[in-house]
């Protein structure tokens, strides 16, 4: 099963879970699978139009994905990592 690594600042909906194993075929469906179990998670990653939020970066097995590549296929054992950039001044 692919797994999703959840950054600390996004663990509210997952009740503190740092890794969630999912059944999914793409990076996007991995996020959707986490949402199905932990409502409120997906809105941290995608906006209402389904686009990646401005300060979120996704990685697949440690390699950065382009913002438009959220429909990249995943395989058994793959790991989707989420980087939640902090902004402020």
Image (cartoon, rainbow, N blue to C red):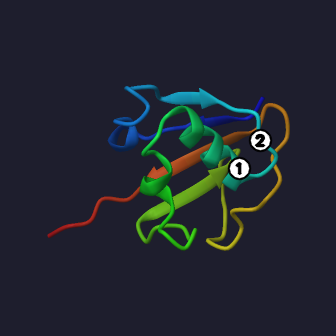
Circles 2, 1 touching at the beta carbon (< 8 Å)? yes
Residue under label 1: 29
Residue at the location (77% across, 52% down)?
Answer: 26
Q: CA distance from mark 2 to mark 1?
A: 5 Å
Find residue 67 and name its label: none
Find residue 24 and name its label: 2
- SS assignment at label 1: helix
Q: Position of residue 73 (x, y in %)?
A: 83, 53
51 vs 12: above or below: below
Q: Position of residue 71 (x, y in %)?
A: 75, 62
Q: Earlier in the sequence, mark 2 or mark 1?
A: 2
Near-viewer residue (84 or 36):
36
The reply, left or right, for residue 86 in relation to residue 2 is left
Q: Position of residue 9 (x, y in %)?
A: 33, 43
Residue at the location (43% across, 72% down)?
Answer: 54
Near-viewer residue (64 or 54):
54
Q: Position of residue 79 (x, y in %)?
A: 69, 39
Query: Where does the N terminus fall, quadrant-wise?
Result: top right
- SS assignment at label 2: loop
Query: Where does the C terminus fall, quadrant-wise?
Result: bottom left
54 vs 75: above or below: below
- Give the crowd class for mark 1: few <14, some 14-19, many >=20 residues within 10 Å: some
Could you say which quadrant of the image residue 24 lies in?
top right
- Give the crowd class for mark 2: few <14, some 14-19, many >=20 residues within 10 Å: many
Residue at the location (74% across, 34% down)?
Answer: 2
Q: Report the residue that reaches farthest toward the left.
A: 89
Residue at the location (42% across, 45% down)?
Answer: 40
74 vs 5: above or below: below
């Amino acid at each position: 099963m692919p797994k999703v690594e959840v950054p600390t600042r996004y663990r509210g909906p997952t009740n503190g879970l740092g890794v969630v194993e999912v059944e999914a075929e793409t990076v996007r469906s991995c996020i959707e699978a986490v949402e199905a179990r932990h409502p409120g998670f997906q809105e941290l990653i995608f906006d209402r139009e389904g686009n990646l939020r401005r300060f979120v970066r996704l990685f697949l097995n440690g390699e950065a994905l382009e913002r438009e590549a959220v429909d990249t296929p995943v395989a058994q054992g793959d790991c989707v990592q989420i980087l939640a950039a902090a902004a402020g001044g």
